[in-house]
Amino acid sequence: MDKENTYDALIIGSGASGLSLALRLADHARVAVLSKVALNEGSTLYAQGGISAVLDAQDSLESHIEDTLVSGAGLCNPDTVRLVVSQAKDCIDWLLERGVAFTEVENGDHAHQLHLTREGGHTHRRVVHAADATGRAVESSLEKSARAHPNIALFEYHNVIDLITSRKLGLGGPQRVLGAYVLDAKRQQIHAFRARVIALATGGASKVYLYTSNPDVSTGDGIALAWRAGARVANMEFIQFHPTCLYHPHARSFLISEAVRGEGGRLLLPDGSPFMHRFDPRGELAPRDVVARAIDHEMKRLGADCVYLDISHRPADFVRSHFPTIHARCLELGIDMTRTPIPVVPAAHYTCGGVLTDHAARTDIEGLYAVGEVACTGLHGANRMASNSLLECLVFAKQASQDILDRLAEIPPCPALPEWDESKVTDSDEEVVVSHNWDEIRRFMWDYVGIVRTDKRLQRALHRAELLKQEIADYYGNFRVTSDLLELRNLVIVAELIIRSALLRKESRGLHFTLDYPGHDDSRPPENTVLTP
């Protein structure tokens, strides 16, 4: 075993969750961070809106808790919600100490305070932001700190193939994580990394859908890794579709922040008439599931390609100063949002379910943690409230770091790990199989497991997923691994988990809406959908 690939903590993923955890551990442990592409190329970089935190005297923790519980449609864990909300201010202060430049406003004494905006589901202004590029500000600051820390080793273009557990090695005792097999994609070499603890911080799985606001890396890798290792997952049916992704042939996956609606943006039909008031008294500031279904309904009713988001009634200087990134991108495409509405459509955006964890971010497997969108903590329930996601990343990175540091000295060193065996595989001469199966998964998931579902559509999707999973497994067993193949292998597992979870829920709740069961099942208390390998 290469001693250089032995660490106290191995963190898989380099967004807000992964880098926050690395920085909180690094003063007391040797840490490796793996990123399957460039270090900053993940969902955090593209997060526009902000981070929810109670900072206004008119606001309260109880209000933030209640708003989150309402958005979660009865499935949030109240203890988890309180834990996260109560630590928001400390986490914002921690980011400020690391140089994150949040947007400020002058108060009456010429002093500055953080500007707060409002987004869907919130009853108060409580979203801290850096203009309309909060994720970029957070990611760049954390990346700078991580690159400067002597105890953090950063590995870009390193894609995890599988976790190595004691059970896989035939060792006795409780199931324990020992390391991971990792593909160095640039050198096409596979190495075994070993660590006392491993944290999954790989983000979500929205690339399982044809249309998504997520970057290409969001292929559910951590969920699939944990599932193959034997950890439970929960609530995978709850996929959040962001209501407003820019509709333009040259704008792939560009999100129009919910803050545009928070600052007065109105949703309009192609004829210019508003419609959200017909679906919810909260109008444009209804929770995302309500807004996305309303847009989907109107597009299907009218046969329209998109609807429109209009903030041109606000002063042009206001629009440009509050949404500089969105304004600049729209201008590049010939859309001046200070004068004309923006064409928008819903797109898969956030995975509310994931690897089941406790309040310390621990999974079912000893030594394996999951932080951020990859995890199901109980915060989001059946629908995530806007800007609670980055907050969850920060809080559970803190929770995990405290637990890891408390227990690290008690964890025995990992045994030597066998090297990766490629003696029975060859280079593929059928790469078209990978690209074809990738496209097929994303298309049937969009068509059959999208915003509105039926049991018939779900069964059709499950049949295709099962066939493709076997085909991909056969391919994986015969050819050398590539990053594309690893993502495809993970993607089909996540697709199946979403479908099976959706079939188990015989009601409509939050983000899961089925025409076969259009209302809540009030015959029993709402339950999480938990799947066991």
Image (cartoon, rainbow, N blue to C red):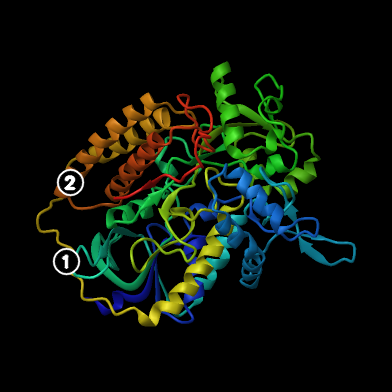
Q: Residue at x 10, y 58 (%)?
A: 423
Find residue 170 and name its label.
Answer: 1
Per the image, the residue denoted by label 2 is 428
Q: Residue at x 67, y 64 (%)?
A: 101
- How packed mark 2 is, by other alpha carbons closer than 10 Å (few <14, some 14-19, many 20 or more), is some
Residue 490 visible in this rendered orientation of the protein: yes
- Report the side of 33 relative to 509 (left or right): left
- Report the side of 284 relative to 21 (left or right): right
Q: Is residue 275 above or below residue 128?
A: above
Query: Which of pointers 1 and 2 lies earlier in the amino acid sequence?
Result: 1
Residue 518: image x %, image y %?
51, 27
Q: Is residue 99 above or below residue 507?
A: below
- Report the side of 326 relative to 184 (left or right): right
Find residue 124 and name its label.
Answer: none
- C-alpha distance separating marks 1 and 2: 31 Å
Amino acid type, residue under disc 1 in the picture: Gly
**Disc number lying in front (1 or 2):** 1
The mark total stands at 2
Question: Depth check: 171 or 48 in front?
Answer: 171
Q: Is residue 518 above or below residue 108?
A: above
- How packed mark 1 is, by other alpha carbons closer than 10 Å (few <14, some 14-19, many 20 or more), is few
Amino acid type, residue under disc 2 in the picture: Ser
Q: Secondary structure at mark 1?
A: loop
Residue 387: image x %, image y %?
61, 51
Q: Is residue 123 above or below residue 437?
A: below
Q: Residue at x 56, y 53 (%)?
A: 389
